[in-house]
Amino acid sequence: MLGDLGLVAGLALLILLALRGVNILLAVLISVLVIGVTNNLPIEDIFLKHFPFGPSGAFSFAGNFLLLFLCGGLFGRVMAASHAAQGVAVGIMSWLGQKRALLIAMLVCAVLTYGGVVVFVVMFTMYPIGVTLMRTANIPRRLYAAAIALGAGTFTMTALPGTPSIHNVIAARSLSTDLFAGGWYGVLAAVIMAGLGMWYLQRQWHAAQRQGEDYIANDKDQHMAALAPKEGEPLPGLGLSLAPIILVLATIILPRILQSIGFDSTWQQFASTQPVLWASFALLVGSALCFVLFPPVRKQFVQAAGQGVDDALLPLINTAAVIGFGGVVIQTTGFHAFAQWLLALDIPALVSVFVSANLISGVTASASGGLQIFMSSLAPAYLEAGIAPELLHRIANLAAGGLDSLPHSGAVIALLTLMGLTHKEAYKDIFVVTVAIPMLAAFIAVVAALVLV
């Protein structure tokens, strides 16, 4: 009984500390101490075994995915330094017009994240551009933040096949599938997330206009606007700016194309069995193309590469810390009882996957953290229940992208902090587009799979 109360108290404490702006690593360490002590786990095992080095330990995760995070950070920073990221944004802006600013924000974020730019880099790329968009189109800051969250943290993260996101790679690595596994279900869910999410944001924008809610500048805006391209500064065209992203995606998909035509080779087998290394290689290839195509980045490539590494470290540490929190949680009897209860529910196995992956991601407030724990602790049982690895890959990914964006999510906190917003001001809109709608999309994908399989 005390252990179960400790689990609840530890999770509640983590959420509370995160909401109060406490560093997520510090919040995790305090919370795991509460959970460990109330569950009679030796302190030395908590901090020297389960949290850092267990199967779902922080350092275990960081070691396995360090290269992918570093290459993602490098590619994102090189895209920004070359002005290719801004070229994508401005090109789509010219195509759609500033009146469609929310759609532009979603599309640019989606293109960048689908091409491998890490979410945190996308946030910093979009905010300077967003200052101009918000001012020109009179968009409330809270809605622009939600548009960024929709484009960067939903369908390109867990749904669209082929994305080099950490979530897609975790599933591929754990299940020996490729990054395109369960692709049609992912496409279905992506259309629902993007369509319903943008419908909601446009509806809220019109309501804000009727109520006289305007864009209000803050102190951050002037500073961040300085990071945007200077007026009159030449930018690469949309086609050229997209070239590195297209190359990244083409590199990832190439082994699958070759396999479909019957070509077999050692490197192709390597690409299929090593999704972390292959996705990292694809991001390096994209970075190299930026170096070749864009003179601005050649002048500061070493500096940009170093900044890219810095960009990757904080997301890696925060994600690893939350996964380490889960690594302690799964050592408790309460978690094992919870897992057994989930597996024993008299519901279809795919529905059970939807429920369990959602709840675990909610506990960790991280889709990648929840997915890592799900794959190490529950996925084997679902495979034994007869779910195909490719289907489990996609459904688990979709489900993990539901409750992951609760208030204590590191990405949510980073976005609100960057844009100078509070949870009270902006979290409702972020919740709708990153929690409610993705959960609905994932459930529809589950229903479609039950009908078709």
Image: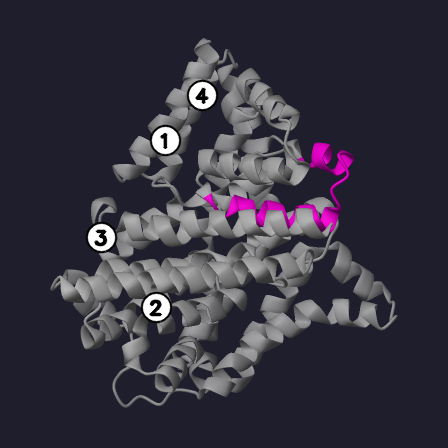
Label 1 packing within 10 angstroms: few (<14), some (14-19), many (20+): many
Q: Which residue is mark 2?
A: 126
Residue 180 visible here: yes
| Residue located at (75% from left, 46% from top) | 388
Percent position of residue 362, x then y: 45, 37
* Horizontal arrangement in the rendering, residue 424 relative to residue 298 (left or right): left
Q: Which residue is mark 3?
A: 421
> Element at badge 3?
loop
Label 2 packing within 10 angstroms: few (<14), some (14-19), many (20+): many
* Horizontal arrangement in the rendering, residue 320 relative to residue 16 (left or right): right
> Any magenta on residue 6?
no
> Any magenta on residue 382?
yes
Distance of label 1 from label 3 (alpha carbons): 20 Å
Q: For the magenta stretch, what is the residue range? A: 379-402
Percent position of residue 236, x then y: 43, 87
Label 3 packing within 10 angstroms: few (<14), some (14-19), many (20+): some
Q: Which mark is residue 14?
A: 1
Distance of label 3 from label 2 (alpha carbons): 16 Å
Closer to us: 192 or 35:
192
* 441 up-or-down from 19: above or below: below
| Residue located at (55% from left, 54% from top) | 158
Q: Residue furthest left?
A: 212
Distance of label 1 from label 4 (alpha carbons): 11 Å
Closer to us: 145 or 187:
187
> Element at badge 4?
helix
Q: Which residue is mark 4?
A: 7
> Element at badge 1?
helix
Amino acid type, callout 2: Met
Closer to us: 194 or 119:
194
